Amino acid sequence: MRGEVCIGSASFLSLASLILLIFVHIGQINTSSVGKGVSMVKVNTSGYDDALTIITLDPIVGVHATNASAPLQARTGLRELYLFGLYSFCGYTNETAGACSNRTVGMQFRPYPILTSDMAVNYSVLTDGLFDTAFQSQQPTFRDSSYLGGSTRAAYYMILLGTICTGLAFLTGLIRHGMTFFISTAFALIGSLLLLIGAAIWTVVINKSDAINDVMVGSTPAPLGIIVSIGPALYMLWAAFAVLLVSVVPYMLVCCTYRG
Ligand SMILES: *[C@@H]1O[C@H](CO)[C@@H](O)[C@H](O)[C@H]1NC(C)=O
Ligand SMILES: *[C@@H]1O[C@H](CO)[C@@H](O)[C@H](O)[C@H]1NC(C)=O
Ligand SMILES: *[C@@H]1O[C@H](CO)[C@@H](O)[C@H](O)[C@H]1NC(C)=O
Ligand SMILES: *[C@@H]1O[C@H](CO)[C@@H](O)[C@H](O)[C@H]1NC(C)=O
Ligand SMILES: *[C@@H]1O[C@H](CO)[C@@H](O)[C@H](O)[C@H]1NC(C)=O
Protein backbone atom coordinates (compact mmCIF):
# COMPACT_ATOMS: atom_id res chain seq x y z
CA MET A 1 0.00 0.00 0.00
CA ARG A 2 1.23 3.50 -0.85
CA GLY A 3 2.10 5.63 2.18
CA GLU A 4 -0.46 8.35 1.43
CA VAL A 5 -3.25 5.80 1.11
CA CYS A 6 -2.22 4.24 4.41
CA ILE A 7 -2.12 7.57 6.23
CA GLY A 8 -5.44 8.58 4.70
CA SER A 9 -7.25 5.39 5.64
CA ALA A 10 -5.82 5.38 9.18
CA SER A 11 -6.96 9.00 9.73
CA PHE A 12 -10.36 8.26 8.19
CA LEU A 13 -10.92 5.26 10.48
CA SER A 14 -9.83 7.03 13.68
CA LEU A 15 -11.99 10.03 12.78
CA ALA A 16 -15.00 7.75 12.13
CA SER A 17 -14.44 6.14 15.53
CA LEU A 18 -14.18 9.57 17.19
CA ILE A 19 -17.46 10.75 15.60
CA LEU A 20 -19.26 7.62 16.81
CA LEU A 21 -17.89 8.24 20.31
CA ILE A 22 -19.06 11.86 20.29
CA PHE A 23 -22.59 10.63 19.56
CA VAL A 24 -22.29 8.12 22.40
CA HIS A 25 -21.31 10.97 24.75
CA ILE A 26 -24.09 13.39 23.79
CA GLY A 27 -26.91 10.83 24.10
CA GLN A 28 -29.74 11.84 26.49
CA ILE A 29 -28.18 15.19 27.43
CA ASN A 30 -31.58 16.69 26.62
CA THR A 31 -34.80 15.70 24.83
CA SER A 32 -34.47 17.95 21.80
CA SER A 33 -30.93 17.47 20.46
CA VAL A 34 -29.67 14.93 17.95
CA GLY A 35 -28.73 12.75 20.90
CA LYS A 36 -32.37 12.16 21.77
CA GLY A 37 -32.59 8.63 20.38
CA VAL A 38 -29.07 7.71 21.50
CA SER A 39 -29.02 5.75 24.76
CA MET A 40 -26.91 3.01 26.33
CA VAL A 41 -29.89 1.22 27.84
CA LYS A 42 -33.67 1.51 27.68
CA VAL A 43 -36.12 0.67 30.47
CA ASN A 44 -39.74 0.42 29.32
CA THR A 45 -42.22 0.33 32.21
CA SER A 46 -45.44 0.51 30.22
CA GLY A 47 -46.88 -2.76 31.59
CA TYR A 48 -46.10 -2.17 35.27
CA ASP A 49 -49.53 -0.77 36.22
CA ASP A 50 -51.20 -3.85 34.71
CA ALA A 51 -48.86 -6.06 36.74
CA LEU A 52 -49.73 -4.18 39.97
CA THR A 53 -53.43 -4.65 39.17
CA ILE A 54 -52.85 -8.41 38.84
CA ILE A 55 -50.84 -8.56 42.08
CA THR A 56 -53.15 -6.46 44.27
CA LEU A 57 -56.41 -7.57 42.59
CA ASP A 58 -57.43 -3.89 42.69
CA PRO A 59 -57.65 -1.68 39.65
CA ILE A 60 -54.48 0.40 39.92
CA VAL A 61 -54.55 3.89 38.44
CA GLY A 62 -52.16 6.84 38.44
CA VAL A 63 -48.89 4.89 38.38
CA HIS A 64 -47.66 6.57 35.22
CA ALA A 65 -47.04 10.29 34.80
CA THR A 66 -49.32 12.30 32.53
CA ASN A 67 -47.31 15.53 32.58
CA ALA A 68 -44.27 14.98 30.36
CA SER A 69 -42.41 18.07 31.60
CA ALA A 70 -42.85 17.42 35.32
CA PRO A 71 -39.47 16.96 37.06
CA LEU A 72 -37.99 13.47 37.41
CA GLN A 73 -37.40 11.77 40.78
CA ALA A 74 -40.08 13.90 42.41
CA ARG A 75 -42.92 11.35 42.72
CA THR A 76 -44.75 12.86 39.75
CA GLY A 77 -45.41 9.44 38.20
CA LEU A 78 -43.53 6.62 36.50
CA ARG A 79 -42.46 7.34 32.89
CA GLU A 80 -43.28 4.89 30.09
CA LEU A 81 -39.72 4.81 28.90
CA TYR A 82 -36.40 5.69 30.55
CA LEU A 83 -33.35 6.17 28.35
CA PHE A 84 -29.93 6.25 29.99
CA GLY A 85 -26.96 8.09 28.48
CA LEU A 86 -23.47 8.49 29.89
CA TYR A 87 -24.17 11.79 31.69
CA SER A 88 -27.92 11.86 32.31
CA PHE A 89 -31.12 9.97 31.70
CA CYS A 90 -34.48 11.04 30.34
CA GLY A 91 -37.98 9.81 31.14
CA TYR A 92 -40.54 9.87 28.33
CA THR A 93 -44.31 9.75 28.82
CA ASN A 94 -44.72 8.82 25.14
CA GLU A 95 -42.45 8.42 22.10
CA THR A 96 -41.71 12.14 21.89
CA ALA A 97 -42.31 14.01 25.14
CA GLY A 98 -40.09 13.75 28.17
CA ALA A 99 -37.86 15.35 30.79
CA CYS A 100 -34.20 14.76 31.62
CA SER A 101 -32.23 14.50 34.84
CA ASN A 102 -29.36 16.74 35.87
CA ARG A 103 -26.04 15.92 34.22
CA THR A 104 -23.33 14.16 36.17
CA VAL A 105 -19.85 13.11 35.11
CA GLY A 106 -19.55 9.37 35.70
CA MET A 107 -23.30 8.93 36.14
CA GLN A 108 -24.20 5.52 37.48
CA PHE A 109 -26.88 3.28 36.00
CA ARG A 110 -29.14 2.78 39.04
CA PRO A 111 -32.55 2.10 37.55
CA TYR A 112 -34.41 0.86 40.63
CA PRO A 113 -34.17 3.99 42.85
CA ILE A 114 -34.81 6.18 39.80
CA LEU A 115 -38.03 4.37 38.92
CA THR A 116 -39.33 4.16 42.48
CA SER A 117 -38.57 7.83 43.20
CA ASP A 118 -40.90 8.76 40.35
CA MET A 119 -43.78 6.69 41.79
CA ALA A 120 -46.32 7.98 44.28
CA VAL A 121 -45.30 6.86 47.80
CA ASN A 122 -47.98 4.17 48.02
CA TYR A 123 -46.70 2.51 44.82
CA SER A 124 -43.04 2.74 45.73
CA VAL A 125 -43.79 1.13 49.11
CA LEU A 126 -45.68 -1.60 47.28
CA THR A 127 -42.80 -2.07 44.82
CA ASP A 128 -40.20 -2.29 47.61
CA GLY A 129 -42.34 -4.92 49.31
CA LEU A 130 -42.60 -6.97 46.14
CA PHE A 131 -38.86 -6.85 45.47
CA ASP A 132 -38.13 -7.74 49.12
CA THR A 133 -40.33 -10.82 49.05
CA ALA A 134 -41.89 -12.13 45.85
CA PHE A 135 -39.09 -11.42 43.39
CA GLN A 136 -36.18 -12.10 45.69
CA SER A 137 -35.97 -15.77 44.66
CA GLN A 138 -35.77 -14.64 41.03
CA GLN A 139 -32.75 -12.49 41.94
CA PRO A 140 -33.31 -9.55 39.63
CA THR A 141 -29.94 -7.80 39.42
CA PHE A 142 -32.08 -4.84 38.36
CA ARG A 143 -32.29 -3.84 42.02
CA ASP A 144 -28.58 -4.32 42.79
CA SER A 145 -27.77 -0.63 42.43
CA SER A 146 -24.30 -0.79 43.95
CA TYR A 147 -23.22 -3.47 41.43
CA LEU A 148 -24.90 -1.78 38.43
CA GLY A 149 -23.82 1.71 39.50
CA GLY A 150 -20.21 0.81 40.35
CA SER A 151 -19.70 -1.13 37.12
CA THR A 152 -21.15 1.55 34.86
CA ARG A 153 -19.16 4.27 36.60
CA ALA A 154 -15.95 2.33 35.96
CA ALA A 155 -17.07 1.76 32.36
CA TYR A 156 -17.62 5.50 31.95
CA TYR A 157 -13.99 6.32 32.77
CA MET A 158 -12.79 3.60 30.36
CA ILE A 159 -14.96 5.13 27.62
CA LEU A 160 -13.78 8.67 28.45
CA LEU A 161 -10.09 7.68 28.35
CA GLY A 162 -10.73 5.61 25.21
CA THR A 163 -12.30 8.66 23.56
CA ILE A 164 -9.31 10.84 24.49
CA CYS A 165 -6.91 8.21 23.06
CA THR A 166 -8.99 8.07 19.85
CA GLY A 167 -8.80 11.86 19.48
CA LEU A 168 -5.04 11.83 20.13
CA ALA A 169 -4.51 8.98 17.64
CA PHE A 170 -6.32 11.03 15.00
CA LEU A 171 -4.47 14.29 15.78
CA THR A 172 -0.96 12.84 16.04
CA GLY A 173 -1.59 10.93 12.80
CA LEU A 174 -2.07 14.24 10.99
CA ILE A 175 1.49 15.33 11.78
CA ARG A 176 3.64 13.79 9.04
CA HIS A 177 6.57 12.42 10.94
CA GLY A 178 7.83 8.87 11.59
CA MET A 179 7.76 9.20 15.38
CA THR A 180 4.20 10.53 15.47
CA PHE A 181 2.95 7.47 13.57
CA PHE A 182 4.41 5.31 16.29
CA ILE A 183 2.50 7.42 18.85
CA SER A 184 -0.72 7.20 16.79
CA THR A 185 -0.38 3.42 16.66
CA ALA A 186 0.06 3.29 20.42
CA PHE A 187 -2.95 5.57 21.08
CA ALA A 188 -5.14 3.57 18.68
CA LEU A 189 -4.15 0.31 20.39
CA ILE A 190 -4.63 1.61 23.96
CA GLY A 191 -7.85 3.40 22.96
CA SER A 192 -9.39 0.29 21.45
CA LEU A 193 -8.49 -1.73 24.53
CA LEU A 194 -10.19 0.85 26.81
CA LEU A 195 -13.28 0.99 24.57
CA LEU A 196 -13.43 -2.81 24.56
CA ILE A 197 -13.44 -2.89 28.37
CA GLY A 198 -16.10 -0.15 28.60
CA ALA A 199 -18.37 -1.79 26.03
CA ALA A 200 -17.93 -5.22 27.61
CA ILE A 201 -18.85 -3.93 31.10
CA TRP A 202 -22.01 -2.24 29.77
CA THR A 203 -22.98 -5.38 27.82
CA VAL A 204 -22.61 -7.58 30.91
CA VAL A 205 -24.51 -5.08 33.10
CA ILE A 206 -27.44 -4.95 30.67
CA ASN A 207 -27.46 -8.71 30.16
CA LYS A 208 -27.66 -9.20 33.92
CA SER A 209 -30.25 -6.52 34.65
CA ASP A 210 -32.55 -7.72 31.88
CA ALA A 211 -33.39 -10.79 34.00
CA ILE A 212 -36.20 -8.47 35.19
CA ASN A 213 -37.84 -8.98 31.77
CA ASP A 214 -38.63 -12.61 32.64
CA VAL A 215 -40.16 -11.95 36.08
CA MET A 216 -43.75 -13.21 36.16
CA VAL A 217 -46.54 -12.22 38.55
CA GLY A 218 -49.97 -13.53 39.49
CA SER A 219 -51.55 -16.97 39.51
CA THR A 220 -51.90 -17.09 35.74
CA PRO A 221 -48.37 -15.75 35.27
CA ALA A 222 -48.23 -12.40 33.51
CA PRO A 223 -45.13 -10.30 32.84
CA LEU A 224 -44.01 -7.70 35.39
CA GLY A 225 -44.07 -5.15 32.60
CA ILE A 226 -40.57 -3.74 33.10
CA ILE A 227 -38.42 -4.39 30.03
CA VAL A 228 -34.69 -3.60 29.93
CA SER A 229 -33.03 -3.54 26.51
CA ILE A 230 -29.79 -2.43 24.85
CA GLY A 231 -29.84 1.09 23.41
CA PRO A 232 -28.23 2.18 20.13
CA ALA A 233 -25.31 3.92 21.91
CA LEU A 234 -23.93 0.56 23.06
CA TYR A 235 -23.88 -0.72 19.46
CA MET A 236 -22.18 2.55 18.43
CA LEU A 237 -19.60 2.01 21.17
CA TRP A 238 -18.87 -1.51 19.89
CA ALA A 239 -18.61 -0.11 16.36
CA ALA A 240 -16.23 2.65 17.54
CA PHE A 241 -14.03 -0.01 19.17
CA ALA A 242 -14.00 -2.16 16.01
CA VAL A 243 -13.22 0.76 13.68
CA LEU A 244 -10.42 2.02 15.94
CA LEU A 245 -8.93 -1.47 16.17
CA VAL A 246 -8.93 -1.75 12.35
CA SER A 247 -7.17 1.64 12.12
CA VAL A 248 -4.21 0.13 14.01
CA VAL A 249 -3.24 -1.81 10.85
CA PRO A 250 -2.62 1.17 8.53
CA TYR A 251 -1.10 3.20 11.41
CA MET A 252 1.32 0.36 12.07
CA LEU A 253 2.16 0.02 8.36
CA VAL A 254 3.07 3.72 7.99
CA CYS A 255 4.87 3.69 11.32
CA CYS A 256 7.08 0.81 10.17
CA THR A 257 7.65 1.93 6.59
CA TYR A 258 7.57 5.74 6.77
CA ARG A 259 10.69 7.32 5.33
CA GLY A 260 9.87 10.99 6.03
C1 LIG B 1 -46.39 20.03 34.18
O1 LIG B 1 -45.19 20.20 34.94
C2 LIG B 1 -44.57 21.48 34.73
C3 LIG B 1 -43.23 21.46 35.46
O2 LIG B 1 -43.38 21.09 36.79
C4 LIG B 1 -45.51 22.57 35.23
O3 LIG B 1 -44.90 23.83 35.00
C5 LIG B 1 -46.83 22.48 34.46
O4 LIG B 1 -47.75 23.42 34.99
C6 LIG B 1 -47.43 21.08 34.58
N1 LIG B 1 -48.60 20.96 33.71
C7 LIG B 1 -49.78 20.50 34.13
C8 LIG B 1 -50.83 20.42 33.10
O5 LIG B 1 -49.95 20.13 35.28
C1 LIG C 1 -42.96 -0.04 25.66
O1 LIG C 1 -43.26 -1.41 25.42
C2 LIG C 1 -44.57 -1.62 24.94
C3 LIG C 1 -44.84 -3.12 24.91
O2 LIG C 1 -43.74 -3.81 24.40
C4 LIG C 1 -44.71 -0.98 23.58
O3 LIG C 1 -46.02 -1.17 23.06
C5 LIG C 1 -44.46 0.53 23.73
O4 LIG C 1 -44.49 1.16 22.46
C6 LIG C 1 -43.11 0.78 24.38
N1 LIG C 1 -43.04 2.19 24.72
C7 LIG C 1 -42.13 3.00 24.21
C8 LIG C 1 -42.23 4.44 24.60
O5 LIG C 1 -41.23 2.60 23.47
C1 LIG D 1 -46.77 13.04 23.67
O1 LIG D 1 -47.14 13.86 24.78
C2 LIG D 1 -47.12 15.23 24.49
C3 LIG D 1 -47.37 16.01 25.77
O2 LIG D 1 -48.10 15.27 26.69
C4 LIG D 1 -48.18 15.53 23.41
O3 LIG D 1 -48.16 16.92 23.09
C5 LIG D 1 -47.84 14.71 22.16
O4 LIG D 1 -48.87 14.87 21.19
C6 LIG D 1 -47.73 13.24 22.51
N1 LIG D 1 -47.25 12.50 21.35
C7 LIG D 1 -47.76 11.33 20.95
C8 LIG D 1 -47.14 10.72 19.75
O5 LIG D 1 -48.69 10.79 21.54
C1 LIG E 1 -30.93 19.21 39.75
O1 LIG E 1 -30.29 20.48 39.87
C2 LIG E 1 -31.11 21.46 40.45
C3 LIG E 1 -30.39 22.81 40.39
O2 LIG E 1 -29.02 22.64 40.60
C4 LIG E 1 -31.45 21.05 41.90
O3 LIG E 1 -32.29 22.02 42.49
C5 LIG E 1 -32.19 19.70 41.86
O4 LIG E 1 -32.43 19.25 43.16
C6 LIG E 1 -31.36 18.66 41.11
N1 LIG E 1 -32.17 17.46 40.96
C7 LIG E 1 -31.77 16.24 41.32
C8 LIG E 1 -32.71 15.12 41.07
O5 LIG E 1 -30.69 16.06 41.85
C1 LIG F 1 -51.71 6.05 45.43
O1 LIG F 1 -51.42 7.42 45.51
C2 LIG F 1 -51.82 8.16 44.35
C3 LIG F 1 -51.31 9.57 44.49
O2 LIG F 1 -51.38 10.03 45.80
C4 LIG F 1 -53.34 8.09 44.22
O3 LIG F 1 -53.76 8.79 43.07
C5 LIG F 1 -53.76 6.62 44.10
O4 LIG F 1 -55.18 6.50 44.06
C6 LIG F 1 -53.20 5.80 45.24
N1 LIG F 1 -53.49 4.41 44.94
C7 LIG F 1 -53.94 3.54 45.84
C8 LIG F 1 -54.19 2.14 45.35
O5 LIG F 1 -54.08 3.83 47.01
Image (cartoon, rainbow, N blue to C red):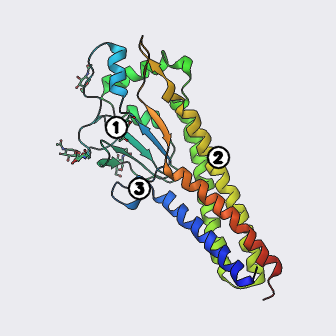
Identify the mark nearer the N-term, 1 or 3.
Answer: 3
At 37% from the left and 15% from the top, the residue drawn is 55
The residue beneath circle 1 is: 80
The quarter of the rendering in which ligand 1 is drawn is: top left
* Tag 1–tag 3 contact (CB < 8 Å): no
* Tag 1–tag 2 contact (CB < 8 Å): no
| Left or right of residue 108: residue 114 | left
Identify the mark nearer the N-term, 3 or 2.
Answer: 3
Q: Tag on residue 29?
A: 3
Label 3 C-beta lies within 8 Å of the nearest ligand 4 atom: no
Give the amino acid type for the residue marked by disc 2 in the picture.
Ala
Q: Which mark is nearer the camera, 1 or 3?
A: 1
CA distance separating discs 1 and 2: 27 Å
Dot 1 crowding, Cα within 10 Å, few <14, some 14–19, many 20+: many
Give the amino acid type for the residue marked by disc 3 in the picture.
Ile
Viewport quadrant of the N terminus: bottom right
Give the amino acid type for the residue marked by disc 1 in the picture.
Glu
CA distance separating discs 3 and 2: 23 Å
Residue 66 in picture, x, y percent from top left: 24, 38
At 50% from the left and 58% from the top, the residue drawn is 25
